[in-house]
Amino acid sequence: MGQKRNKLEISGQFLHCPLFLSIDTYEGCTFGCRYCFANPQYDRQNRGGDRREGIRPTSLTAWEKVLEGRSIGNPMIEYLVNKKHPVQLGTKADPFPRGIEPRVQNTRRFLELCNRVSYPVYISTKNTADLPVELLAQGNYVLAVSLASHRAGDIRLLERSTSQPQERLDRVPFGVFKKIIVRWQPFIPALFKSKHGKGIFDRSEIDRFLDLIAGVADGVSISFLSWGAIQDPAILEIVGPDDVDDLDVVELFTYIREEAHLRGMEFYTANYRALSDSPVCCGLRGDEFEISTRWVWGYLIQELFDGEKEYLTVKDLKRAFPDELKGVIFDTMDVPLYSRWAHYCARKTTILEEYIKDFTYNRRMNPANYFAGLYSKVVEGEFRIYFKDYRLLV
Ligand code: SF4
């Protein structure tokens, strides 16, 4: 099995995600989720080049180097890792590919490196059967288990070779993780629509989902599917479009939040972030899973969330940007940023300039608009990002 180039990344969630660092220990995934965006994206990236065959472990050299305080040509990652900013493991491929990880042990190697310095990692997986429990117990980990539905039939329809909901949850070990989050992702509204004409959503099905995860999860994190990039567009014909009205979602999410709280769980969402228990929508909370630096967006979104600021401008962005990094440029072109300028400006413009471009890039396309429950507009020539306070609607 060949090894692929370093996949240590600044996540594509350049603006809206306070968590921000991500890494994959494999390239390609065998779980075959029909809604997945990762594998088609990988194919697109490799068009015309060496196309992917099966699954490959990624190189951990950069991670090892940066953990040791050595340069990897990316001052932003070096800065964040030095401050032990949490890294998300498993964004484009599951870190525990069945039948492969026990043999290849690339994720095991990654965890061993992290254990040496107690590095905080948010592990995202659907495979709870092959977790190296003894290794995880020695580290600093949050487990995020993805589950799209509580019904076995839905999972069979949506995911080719993952485990059934009950089994997936039963396998989660206790006393090992700092926190366990169930990622209700993707949240597919059509699966929870009422079939009896009483309201848009069937609340008894919502309750069943929450009952299933209660007792295992400390929190539930919901986010919608991005229909534009899914693995198998035919699934759209089966589950139906993602066309729910904002008000209906606000009502539903308010209900889910209340019911989650009643069952002793926290509630997080990126799409309707104002309803979330915290603007850090993955479920990491500073008081229990230390986020050494909240990074630029972490500071800014907290100010919007708390109502300290009505809107953000480029001035705020500059204020929140770490002084140590002002004036610093990327040393390498191999920086996978959301920004399409990254390739052109490595070695030419500063990280801060890139950040500002990403902040103001195409107001309609700005990722903040969709993902973070925000909107932007230009007022008197000034670019501003506003918070959609869905709390006011309920
Ligand atoms: S487990 Fe994750 S990466 Fe793998 S196919 Fe499913 S959604 Fe894609």
Image (spheres, rainbow, N blue to C red):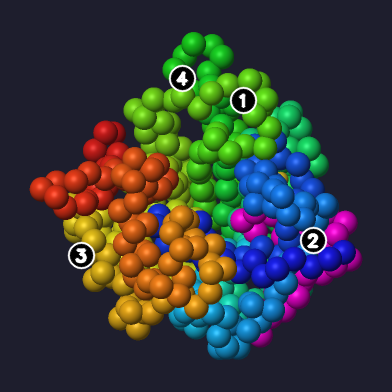
| CA–CA distance in space, label 3 to label 4 | 43 Å
Above or below — where is 66 with respect to 310?
below
Q: Is residue 284 visible?
A: no
Disc nearer the start of the sequence (1/4): 4
Label 1 crowd (10 A; few <14 / some 14-19 / many >=20): some
Q: Residue at x 26, y 33 (%)?
A: 393
Residue situated furthest top in the rendering: 197
Counting from the top left corner in percent of width and height, residue 275 is at 36, 44
List the residue tagged with mark 3: 315
List the residue tagged with mark 1: 236
- Taking the image as shown, residue 70 lies to the left or right of residue 362, namely right
| CA–CA distance in space, label 1 to label 4 | 19 Å
| CA–CA distance in space, label 1 to label 2 | 29 Å
What are the residue bounds of the magenta stretch? 90-116
Q: Is residue 234 visible?
A: yes
| CA–CA distance in space, label 2 to label 4 | 43 Å
Q: Nearer the viewer, mark 3 or mark 1?
A: 3
Quadrant in which the C terminus is drawn: top left
Secondary-structure class at tag 3: helix
Q: Amino acid at mark 1?
A: Leu
